[in-house]
Amino acid sequence: MNHFFVVILFLMAANLYALTEAETSAIIKTVDDLQRNSGDYTSLCYIKDTEKGKEPRLNQALVYRRDTDNKFMILFTKPKEDAGKGYLKIDKNLWNYEPSTGKWDRKTERERIGGTNSRRGDFDESKLSEEFTAVYDGDEKLGDYDAYKFTLAGKNGVDVPYPVLKLWVDKASKNILKREEYSLSKKLMRTSFYPKWMKKFSPSKKSDVWIPEEIRIFDELEKGNTTIILIKEVDLNTLPENMFTKAWVESKSK
């Protein structure tokens, strides 16, 4: 067969199996829905941060969420010098508490949590379909996984750490395998891998929820700097009503 026609047939076949805009949006929404608890969430997190030329630093923190009200809180418990430091997100505001001064400072979504290369979004509920518009880039093989590849652009008026994402989603599970985050100038800032996911039954959702058990983050500006987040002891039962307040965080640092 003429080489030209082989190429044409190949392109037609590829186009035939390309995801439509509606199918792309549905997959991104599924990624969110699989992680959505529709209630409260507690986990114990270990954050290992490695900077080139320095000793690795290990933090331990408790993460609390009330997804129905868009509330998020992280409280550092170890090491001793960081114990009592916390972050509180209510609606669109992210606050950082420093127990040594007793002061609260408002932060942006770009804030490095606890001085590590992690961000609030690494621990919070997935809201990709609400915060970004996705475009299908094609299919890719990622290790042993067959993946969809997407480019996501932040929606107008939405505060996100990085305005452009590239996302690799496992075709079988619809969980994230890899995520790249870019600046407005299209410079690659961070690359994250999600090698392990856990499944938990959610009483509020009355179905299973998928939670990343391990996230490996690579700083693309400072090569050699990495952050590993391990998420353990996940509890999806209801939390006390008055927890998500500045007063509650302050009381835990005394």
Image (spheres, grey):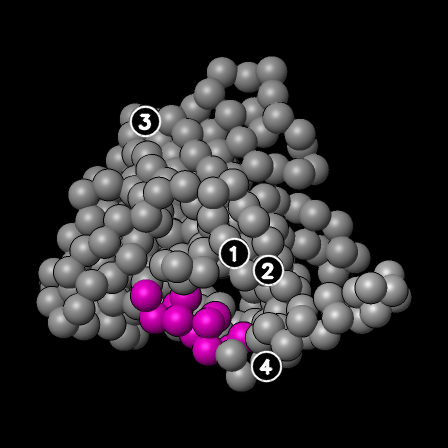
Q: CA distance from mark 2 to mark 3?
A: 43 Å
Q: Earlier in the sequence, mark 3 or mark 4?
A: 4
Nearer to us of marks 1 and 3 is 1
The residue at which mark 1 appears reads as 147
Dot 2 or dot 1: first in sequence order is 2
- Disc 2 to disc 4, C-alpha distance: 15 Å
Circle 4 sits on which residue? 21
C-alpha span from label 1 to label 3? 38 Å
| Label 4 packing within 10 angstroms: few (<14), some (14-19), many (20+) | few
- Label 3 sits on a secondary structure element that is loop
Secondary structure under badge 4? helix
Amino acid bearing label 3: Pro
Q: Amino acid at mark 2?
A: Asp
- Residue 126 % position (x, y): 41, 64
Discs 2, 1 touching: Cβ within 8 Å:
yes
Kindly tell me whether residue 136 is visible in this rendering: yes
Residue tagged 3: 79
Residue under numbered circle 2: 139
The stretch of residues the image draws in magenta is: 24-34
Q: Nearer the viewer, mark 4 or mark 1?
A: 1
Q: Amino acid at mark 1?
A: Ala
Q: CA distance from mark 4 to mark 1?
A: 17 Å
